Image (cartoon, coloured by chain):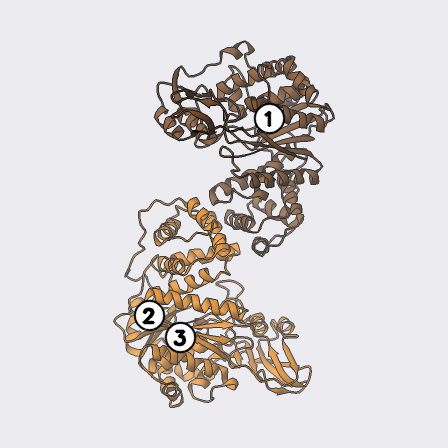
Chain colours: A orange, B brown
Amino acid sequence: MTKPERVKTADVHAVDVNPVDVILAKRRGEAHDRAALDAFIGAYQRGAVADYQVAAWLMAVVWRGMSDAETADLTQVLADSGERLDLAGLPHPVDKHSTGGVGDTTTLVVAPLVAALGATVAKLSGRGLGHSGGTIDKLESIPGFGATLSREAFLRQAREVGIAVTGQSADLAPADGLLYALRDATGTVESIPLIASSIMSKKLAGGAKHLVLDVKSGSGAFMKSDDDARELARAMVRIGQRAGLAVRAVRSRMDEPLGRAVGHALEVNEALAVLRGDARGGAQNALREVVVVLAFELLESAGLVSGRAEVEAALDDGRALTRFERWIDAQGGDVSQLDRLEVAPDRATWTASASGTLRRIDAERVGVAVSRLGGGRAKKGDAIDLGVGAVLHARVGDEIAAGDAIATLYHRGGRGLEGALAALAGAAEVGPPLTPEPVVIEVLR
Amino acid sequence: MTKPERVKTADVHAVDVNPVDVILAKRRGEAHDRAALDAFIGAYQRGAVADYQVAAWLMAVVWRGMSDAETADLTQVLADSGERLDLAGLPHPVDKHSTGGVGDTTTLVVAPLVAALGATVAKLSGRGLGHSGGTIDKLESIPGFGATLSREAFLRQAREVGIAVTGQSADLAPADGLLYALRDATGTVESIPLIASSIMSKKLAGGAKHLVLDVKSGSGAFMKSDDDARELARAMVRIGQRAGLAVRAVRSRMDEPLGRAVGHALEVNEALAVLRGDARGGAQNALREVVVVLAFELLESAGLVSGRAEVEAALDDGRALTRFERWIDAQGGDVSQLDRLEVAPDRATWTASASGTLRRIDAERVGVAVSRLGGGRAKKGDAIDLGVGAVLHARVGDEIAAGDAIATLYHRGGRGLEGALAALAGAAEVGPPLTPEPVVIEVLR
């Protein structure tokens, strides 16, 4: 995305800020007001406050926390640190954000689904890191698909097709980018107010009017515990309320992979299956279940549907698929190749070691296994293999016999296979029967 | 002091350290072991760990604290980061450290007093900052006195005269210097384990075998509360015990200035009065009282005296004064000028606004007043006026009448006088009779 015109520039006040006073205030557990945050973050962006001062402040925030008002103020300060996209001229601009999971390809289905029902998805999306895949990477497994749009092309396509997805712009919430890099290097990533303000600052700068958050908890999620996930979801909803953004948070489980496919091209194949209405929702198709809930919450928030059946109909009658193909075509993707995406040529099997009910499949381990096959990045900028991955043949709650395949691994000449199988050792558990929990836990508004 | 031969070089292990892991461990409240501290601080000194990482770690230490073993380990790591002076060949090498006060010129008396009784004081001393004066600055009000000794001259003089005092060397505990500068800029100065390890690392590197700490609390002290001062004193004594250094901590009050004089040349004059045995101890001569206690604790620890009377005798019979003059002479000072030190020529009076008992004289405000007259530094390297200052005519507990002089200010042509008098407004309180508390609170061993 080329550098766009600024809608609102960083509003750095001329307030003189003594960084040590700001750090000491947070160290004592005091709440900062908007002016103090504006001055502190603004001075940091200008280089007038040092990395080490912000680092000490970040750890004090981890220690002392932030009030709701303070978290909302920090979010606005970060959102105001660069451009804000103006999507006000587009019909029902909506956005979605996932806290990141394994086999989670909801965006590829939710975007065309809500567009088919009247919303506009003009979305900046990221690449994968660690054991989680990224939407942009998945889309690039479609021959010809381009994820770098000029601002003009991005907005024109959003208006004409109802969907445009492009890579994250460094011009959006640049102060958040600075803070995030510092948090990553200083052990201050895990903090509800810092995570919530980071995510929401980019969403506020992104310009949508309705936002749905997919907040995951479980072994394959960033938030391992339900309580932390609920707290994060609530914090983001409250930020949205204070910022005049309609936000709903869907809390979903990420203990086993969401879909059956894990890996870029394989996940596009699975998204296509959902778009074709091949499968129903419920426990046996958690991906479709989450897709429908996310789409419904966005569309109801925007006043475009009143019931879940309207959403399901657009999946089942092909409207969502048609919109998907228009979108891929608009961004240069070869739609005729959608059923022939390149996947790695070699196969291996991950088998069950006992007979009984499958009680657990560790999503993070499956993500790590695919990453080791070449499908994940250890650090930003690493090249990845879009064709490797895993396809699960069973879900938690299914009966399985010793020696049955739990999953097929798609690899390239054995590269990373040993490491992948090592990651999977013990990642599945077989035992007495159990009824799987619903994938969607609750919706917070 | 020129760069001396290293007795023990920084023992940086080849341990690979992941700084984020170290920060996260402290964030979780875990204690570091010696190897982790060695690797982390060593890597910081080499530039392999960034300032911002150490800053986040420092705030996590402020938050989570440090165990006794951990504080002692950090102290050793800092002491090992540069040279360690080897004073083992000198008879009874002793050292003293004060946490800093106002009108506190104990070192100028304690050093010759303990030297007169058989101890060796080979001491690195600092300059003043803020409202506290420094020993080196006070000594430089004596014409000709030189505070920069080569290592050879320093050790030779210590052996021949029993006392040598030189400026702080950057070669001693250099990692502490790095950490201190970072703490100063990141709001992480106030932390008992960080303060204790910082002070004690320089003392360990300084090579003495017996150490007495003068830990002050009250309005003019760094530690305002008695509890914090006790905790700091205990922490330093425990570090000493673990390091095999005989440490005693004298806790003393710093609510009113310790002596009657505040200001460099004026304080040397007062030290001379105590060395001449002009005054007795007790509440009416808190300076002599603290001097005798500090000297006694050092000398008893070194096995050189068994009672306080032996210490008082060396003050009263002129042995301490003789040793003082030999010391000043050895460092180039003109002993014939000791009774004619240059003081600022102009006088102003700080008067009592009511009649009654003097109940409070705020030491910090008096220090700030003298600083405003030109006698203090706002930042390192500032030039100061050694001739300005204040001489108090009354102590807490004395009767005073409205209009009587509480103190005479020594200024130069009114420079800073308005600010000094403003600092003193309200700094004294007159009311019903009160019995002053003893200046020495307790001795911790």
**Which quarter of the figure has residue A372?**
bottom right
Tell me the mark number nearer the camera, choosing from 3 and 2: 2
Residue A116 position within the rendered picture, expressed as x and y whole percent measured from the top left = 34, 83
Q: Which residue is mark 3?
A: A145
The residue depicted at 49 percent of the width and 11 percent of the height is B340
Mark 1 touches mark 3? (CB < 8 Å): no
Kind of residue at badge 3: Phe
Return the disc, 3 or 2, that comes first in the chain's sequence.
3
Q: Which residue is mark 2?
A: A208
Q: Residue pushed farthest top?
A: B336
Under tag 3, what secondary structure?
loop
Task: Left or right? Give the position of B210 relative to A314.
Answer: right
Residue B218 position within the rendered picture, expressed as x and y whole percent measured from the top left = 52, 35
Tell me the mark number nearer the camera, choosing from 1 and 3: 1
Residue A401 position within the rendered picture, expressed as x and y whole percent measured from the top left = 66, 87
How packed mark 3 is, by other alpha carbons closer than 10 Å (few <14, some 14-19, many 20 or more), is some
Kind of residue at badge 2: Ala
Q: Tell me if I can see residue A270 in this picture.
A: yes
Q: Which residue is mark 1?
A: B290
**Which quarter of the figure has residue B243?**
top right
